[in-house]
Amino acid sequence: MFTKEIYYSRRMQLRSLMKDCRGAIVFPANNEAPMNYHSNTYRYRQDSTFKYFFSQMRDGIVGVIDLESGKDIIFGNDFTIDDIIWMGNQPTVRELAEQCKVTEIKPLDELADFLKGKKIHYLPPYRDDTLIYISRLTQQNLEETKKNASVELIKAVVALRSVKSGDEIKELDRICNVGVMMHLKVMGKCKAGEDEQKLAGLAEGIALANGAGVSFPIILSQDGQTLHNPYHNKKLAGGRLLLVDMGAEDESGYNSDYTRTLPVSGHFTKKQREIYEIVLNANLNAIATAKPDLLWRDVHFAACEDVVQGLKDLGLMKGDVKEAVQLGAHALFMPHGLGHALGMDVHDMEGLGENYVGYDENVKRSTIFGHASLRYGKALKVGNVLTVEPGIYFIPQLIDIWESESKFTDFINYAKVRQYIDFGGIRIEDDIVITHDGCRVLGNPLAKTVQEIEALLD
Ligand code: GLY
Ligand code: MN
Ligand code: MN
């Protein structure tokens, strides 16, 4: 949590960006989410934008920024003695409001009357209970409620949250260090015979012991060719690669997101090392290139070219490298983008609409398979935080389809690709902040080269 002045100043900046709008901005806090019955809930997760403007708080409250009167108001009810018997003493709404420098509070049931006749600005709801709540508040059906989220508000929030302040970067560095600790734990235990599930559990324990938990469900699998593989139910087998993609979330709301790919036997085979070096080269080049004003889309294109050049050197691809990437032939091996924005959400603000976050009037999203998955394409600015995560995957089902359709036969040597059909996948992911003269990798250094990884696994 930051000082109360920071939350106040963020709301003032939002007002300034929305100075031409009338009405009121409404930010409902996230509700508790039941696991199986009302009072048995998942870990509480506050909405990130609510947290950004009003600090942590709790469920059952709504932050309002009245653009006409200039007032910020928190609508909510204090916990009752029945709640306190079960949950212990809780801060009052007044105390919570003071933490973010809001001076006016009102009971929750006065909100509808307060908003009557006003234009209501709200962000796209990503949870159904919030959707229903806003639909009632704005007297629209659910479809209209989804469609009529405030574009002015989305753009203003994206403008503010995209550029991280020094205080935010400190939080990000801290939570990146927790991500590093999680990876080091897995590296220390990565041996044939271990259970993937056990390693995921040990890493998740570190996230919980040093923050609020994981930033997304841990990806830890020897089937790394599945990009977001949710299963970790196998035993580690000598000779295979283990792809580990995970990070932590802080109580203050910031996230980390790292991927490392480990040889279970402790040493990469020649075949694994050759592919690994291509991905590493793409990762390092992207980090060396990223700087203000450069389009992230162009850094992505350059990383795809590194991948194609490397695969061409090994005989898996052929033809003109730039042309292969422009047309999307690389996407057989890297069907995702180079990286995404990172911050209070692990895919920062994507709930507001990916294109609002990653694209603008100058850079439009590609519709070509592979490039279309690039979530962020626009020009970089000092204070942007992004992931850098090139990868090479051998996805048997995709290879079968492309080969049967004779897709990109000018660029892909399918006979050679077949020799890698059970290879799995490699991704290497770091988190960077754009600085005045380039970028800086957040957090403590984490083993990344072949030599560094093999030394840790020994
Ligand atoms: N959440 C997985 C990734 O984007 O890296
Ligand atoms: Mn990741
Ligand atoms: Mn990522």
Image (cartoon, grey):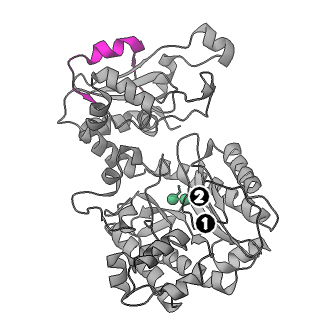
Of 161 and 43, nearer the camera is 43
Q: Looking at the rendering, which quadrant does residue 209 occupy?
A: top right
- Residue 231 in magenta stretch: no
For label 1, count other residues whose C-alpha is less than 10 Å away and answer few (under 14), some (14-19) or many (20+): many
- Amino acid type for the residue under numbered disc 2: Asn
Q: Residue at x 64, y 69 (%)?
A: 261
Relative to 379, is 144 above or below? Answer: above
Q: Secondary structure at mark 2?
A: loop
Relative to 86, is 334 above or below? Answer: below
Which portion, as a residue range, is magenta? 101-121
State yes or no: discs 2 and 1 in contact (Cβ < 8 Å). Answer: yes
Q: Report whether 151 appears left or right of 175.
A: left
Q: Report whether 71 appears left or right of 176.
A: left
Of 345 and 436, nearer the camera is 345
Label 2 to label 1: alpha-carbon separation: 7 Å
Residue 454's x, y, as percent? 73, 76
**Residue where numbered disc 1 is placed:** 224
Q: Secondary structure at mark 1?
A: loop
Of 318 and 337, nearer the camera is 318
Q: Report whether 374 appears left or right of 397.
A: left
**Residue where numbered disc 2 is placed:** 229
Q: Residue at x 25, y 41 (%)?
A: 151
Residue 283's x, y, as percent? 51, 73
In this view, the residue farthest toward the front is 404
For label 2, count other residues whose C-alpha is less than 10 Å away and answer few (under 14), some (14-19) or many (20+): some
Mark 2 or 1, nearer chain start: 1
Q: Residue at x 42, y 38 (%)?
A: 126
**Quarter in which the C terminus is drawn:** bottom right
Q: Report whether 234 appears left or right of 329.
A: right
Residue 269's x, y, as percent? 70, 83
Instruction: Decide if residue 88 is in sight here.
Output: no
- Amino acid type for the residue under numbered disc 1: Gly
